[in-house]
Amino acid sequence: MKKLIIIAAAAENNALGKDNELVWHLPDDFKRFKELTSGHKIIMGRKTLESFPKPLPNRTHIAITRDEDYTPKFPCTVVHSISEAIGLVEDNETAFIIGGGKIYKQSMTIATDIELTRVHGTFEADAFFPEINEEQWELVNEEYHPKDDRHKYDFTYLTYKRK
């Protein structure tokens, strides 16, 4: 069975980012993202791909765009729908859906797991994480991290499994 994991950092108001950038800097969250996604396929929208200065090492990048003539700034697989992206994931393989907001929304009905970093604060944003329907998702792990000299905000890692 394919494992399709949504991975995101979202504020208490579900803010993801503004102007194609994150609105916080959480080094431990970046480290966790790298540890979880390394060695796997990562599925994202075009804008998320374009927010990277270069490819993320040790990951297969799959970018979704409606633009049939899109040329990415570095080599990656370009597809034109979430279902086409999911079709590139083999059985018994894990892939991570890494954003942005529209891709997360489209993925909520097909994902098997959610790894959400809940940033404790509210932020002005132009991209938002979808609401998690508690009837469809079970919270199976919660790990709180207080702010410190490297992290301006408190945050909690939340792991959800589909019911």
Image: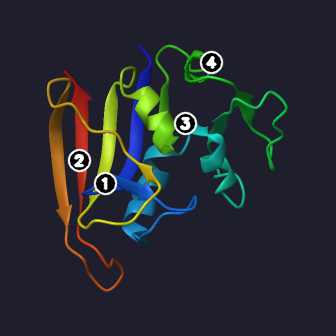
Q: Earlier in the sequence, mark 1 or mark 4?
A: 4
Residue 42: x percent and y percent? 56, 38
Of all residues, the one furthest to the bottom in this rendering is: 149
The quadrant in which residue 104 appears is top left
Q: Earlier in the sequence, mark 2 or mark 3?
A: 3
Contact flag, marks 4 and 2 (Cβ < 8 Å): no
Report the amino acid beneath label 4.
Glu
- For label 3, the crowd category at 10 Å Cα-Cα, with few meaning under 14, some 14 to 19 and many 20 or more, is some
Contact flag, marks 1 and 2 (Cβ < 8 Å): yes
Residue 143: x percent and y percent? 18, 56
- Residue at 44%, 68% in the rendered image: 23
Residue 134: x percent and y percent? 15, 31
The residue labelled by disc 3 is 40
Question: In terms of secondary structure, where does tag 4 sit?
Answer: helix
Total marks in image: 4
Q: CA distance from mark 1 to mark 2?
A: 6 Å
Question: In terms of secondary structure, where does tag 3 sit?
Answer: loop
Q: CA distance from mark 4 to mark 2?
A: 28 Å
Tag of residue 84 = 4
Q: Nearer the viewer, residue 21 or 75?
A: 21
The residue labelled by disc 1 is 117
The residue labelled by disc 2 is 158
Q: Nearer the viewer, residue 38 or 43?
A: 43
